[in-house]
Image: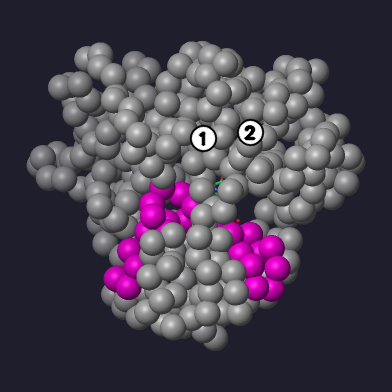
């Protein structure tokens, strides 16, 4: 099946769009109603550069929702399941956001810029609407808006050397999710040690969209010494490393899940002094126990094409007992791997599980997360 996706004016371009098209982007996806590069025509080389070199990604679609004003800290505490009251300025945190039913609706990175100024660097759902509605309903004195900020990720084992060339050796001292306001040849940006891979790296949160192409080209030129390649958030690596993808692994409209099911239970702080959205529902879910759990899967047979849509996991009786939400062929483990959910009553060593792939059944087994072969 070959087809194209129509791009209309409802899908926004990134500030790096002209740069990534000049550099040969060959596939886009859509994230936060924006185009996001999917690959540049050579997924294998892009995977290799992430694993052994350095890759640069246009992740401007990781939009920032700014919450600032006298009640900003209070609103952040109320929106997230984590206790971020002790978070320091210049420190980021991975913060699940749930609705009142305890269903995960986003899993952003929080950046605390000042005692009264925060960014939520969001996954694929409309948190600006959610946060501004909650703020207004609660009569909080805050501004909620999308600032002119566009992250560019630099990931891979050589990322630190490159970023150190650009910003100086101080970057080696950055803690995970630690960040600093800085500039590069006069371009304002926030530099953070973060990014959606386990290969290490940094993100440049560009604060002037008119400089997108210029910033891209500065990084590209400096990265040439390390063999930098343009790429995109890499599904193979994230599955190998066990990172959660809100949207792919579940979203409220399809496969809604609570944090306990999706392995983010440790980020729900019932002990925090402040109330938070979903607290009551999550307490009840925890007390009653979840009905399914997040697992890795190994899919038998020949190497598979990357996943486009989730698949049902069935047992010997043909009952649906789980979901395989994303899968790839893993070069690191030389087998087909995936992630998803399975009913609590299914044993870890179940041998009767099957999926239907391209009309043919394949055996599928449960594997520990993160994968450990
Ligand atoms: N960087 C920035 N914004 C983002 C992402 C990012 N927004 C969207 C999406 N990614 C948010 N989701 C995640 C998911 C996982 C991680 C970061 C963002 C992550 N997880 C580590 C892990 O699971 O091992 C560490 C989590 C922790 O501290 O507990 O890094 O990538 N700017």
Q: Position of residue 265 (x, y in %)?
A: 45, 64
Note whether residue 252 is visible.
yes
**In the image, 358: left or right of 241?**
left
Instruction: Please tell me whether mark 1 sits on a helix, a strand or a loop.
Output: loop
Residue 108 on the magenta span: yes
193 to the left or right of 341: right
- Which span of residues is magenta-colored? 98-127
Residue visible at 49% across and 41% down?
Answer: 61
Observer-nearest residue: 180 or 193? 180
Q: The N terminus appears in which quarter of the rendering? A: top left
Residue 199 visible in the snapshot: no
Instruction: Judge the density around disc 1: few (<14), some (14-19), many (≥20) Cα neighbours within 10 Å.
Output: many
Would you name the residue on which mark 2 appears?
212
Q: Is residue 204 magenta?
A: no
Residue that sits furthest to the bottom in the current view: 273
Q: Closer to the N terminus: mark 2 or mark 1? A: 1
**Extreme right residue here?**
169
Residue placed under numbered mark 1 in the picture: 14
Number of numbered callouts drawn? 2
User: Outermost residue, left direction?
Assistant: 317
In this view, the residue in front, 310 or 4, is: 4
Q: Position of residue 67 (x, y in %)?
A: 55, 66
Q: Secondary structure at mark 2?
A: helix
Q: CA distance from mark 2 to mark 1?
A: 8 Å
- Reply above or below: 367 against 109: above
């Amino acid at each position: 099946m070959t087809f194209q996706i129509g791009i209309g004016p409802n899908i926004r371009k990134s500030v790096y769009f002209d740069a990534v098209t000049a550099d040969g982007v060959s596939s886009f996806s859509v994230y936060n109603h924006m185009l996001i590069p999917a690959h540049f025509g050579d997924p294998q080389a892009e995977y290799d550069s992430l694993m052994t070199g350095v890759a640069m990604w246009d992740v401007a679609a990781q939009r920032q929702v700014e919450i600032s004003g006298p009640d900003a800290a209070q609103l952040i505490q109320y929106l997230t399941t984590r206790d971020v009251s002790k978070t320091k300025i210049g420190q980021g945190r991975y913060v699940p956001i749930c609705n009142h039913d305890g269903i995960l609706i986003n899993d952003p990175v929080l950046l605390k810029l000042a005692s009264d100024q925060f960014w939520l660097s969001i996954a694929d759902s409309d948190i600006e609407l959610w946060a501004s509605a909650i703020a207004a309903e609660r009569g909080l004195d805050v501004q909620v808006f999308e600032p002119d900020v566009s992250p560019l990720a630099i990931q891979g084992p050589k990322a630190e050397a490159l970023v150190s060339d650009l910003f100086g050796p101080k970057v080696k001292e950055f803690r995970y999710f630690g960040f600093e306001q800085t500039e590069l040849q006069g371009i304002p940006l926030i530099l953070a040690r973060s990014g959606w891979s386990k290969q290490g790296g940094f993100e440049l949160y560009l604060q002037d969209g008119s400089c997108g192409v210029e910033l891209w080209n500065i990084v590209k030129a400096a990265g040439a010494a390390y063999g930098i390649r343009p790429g995109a958030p890499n599904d193979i690596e994230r599955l190998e490393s066990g990172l959660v993808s809100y949207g792919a692994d579940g979203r409220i409209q399809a496969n809604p899940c609570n944090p306990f099911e999706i392995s983010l239970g440790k980020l729900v702080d019932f002990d925090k002094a402040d109330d938070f959205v979903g607290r009551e529902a999550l307490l009840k879910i925890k007390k009653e126990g979840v009905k399914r759990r997040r697992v890795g899967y190994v899919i038998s047979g020949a190497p598979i094409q990357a996943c486009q849509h989730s698949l049902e996991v069935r047992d010997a009786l043909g009952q649906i007992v789980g979901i395989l939400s994303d899968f790839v062929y893993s070069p690191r483990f030389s087998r087909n791997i995936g992630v998803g959910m399975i009913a609590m009553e299914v044993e870890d060593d179940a041998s009767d599980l099957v999926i239907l792939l391209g009309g043919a059944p394949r055996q599928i087994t449960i594997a520990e997360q993160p994968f450990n072969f």
